[in-house]
Amino acid sequence: MNISSMFSTSAILSRLQVKSAAPTSSQAPAAKTGAAPVDPAAQQKEELAALKKEREAYDAARNTEIQRRQQEFETTHGRKYGQDGDPPLAYQMALPANERGYLPFVPADTQKTIDAITDKYRNQENLAPMWAELSAMGLSPDQLTKSAKYFISLDGRMVTREEASKGVDIKV
């Protein structure tokens, strides 16, 4: 293609027609009227419900894995788990709570990462490398508290950071 053909009347018109085929003003109002205005409270409620449901599903799968480990222990050692200082089947980190009793909510994907790291150090005596790895990934209890978007009360109610730290001297 030469330069003169690029600037010919037909070439210019064809480029203009392509541009005019883009979304028109008649399409934009249809999109606006078809969708209802987004309610932030409803959207947040849906997000909280989805996070809670995902975490409950993960916890159920994790509990099944822990029960499998317990059965494996009983089969291997011929006795029930929990005697003679048995090593933990899984680690569970304690998360700090604020004055009002709110704990940071750890989403399922984050919990899965924590469990993968802690499982690597199961049955080991020196846990310093585990804590170093968790801290490097931003997953130590204090780091989780500082980065949590949602918090959960001891009765299972999930709230935002603002609600959890309302009226608290030391904000989480």
Image (spheres, rainbow, N blue to C red):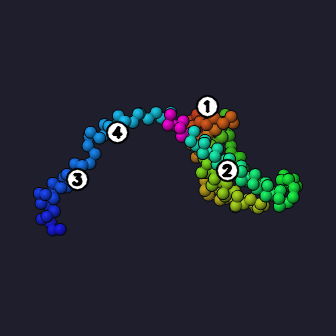
Rendered-image quadrant of the C terminus: top right
| Residue 169 visible within the image | no
Q: Which residue is mark 3?
A: 18
Q: With 69 as the anchor, is 78 left or right in this view?
A: right
Q: Tell me what residue is drawn at x 15 percent, y 56 percent.
A: 12
Q: Which residue is mark 1?
A: 167
Q: Tell me what residue is drawn at x 54 percent, y 40 percent.
A: 47
User: Real-space Cα distance between discs 1 and 4?
Assistant: 43 Å
Q: Residues within 10 Å of mark 2 (few under 14, many from 20)?
A: few
Indicate the quadrant where residue 33 lies: top left
Q: Which residue is mark 4?
A: 31
| Residue 51 visible within the image | yes
Q: Residue type at mark 4?
A: Ala
Q: Residue type at mark 1?
A: Gly
Give the mark nearer the N terminus: 4 vs 3.
3
Rendered-image quadrant of the N terminus: bottom left
How many numbered marks does the figure carry? 4
User: Real-space Cα distance between discs 3 and 2?
Assistant: 53 Å
Give the mark nearer the N terminus: 3 vs 2.
3
User: Real-space Cα distance between discs 1 and 3?
Assistant: 59 Å
Give the mark nearer the N terminus: 1 vs 3.
3
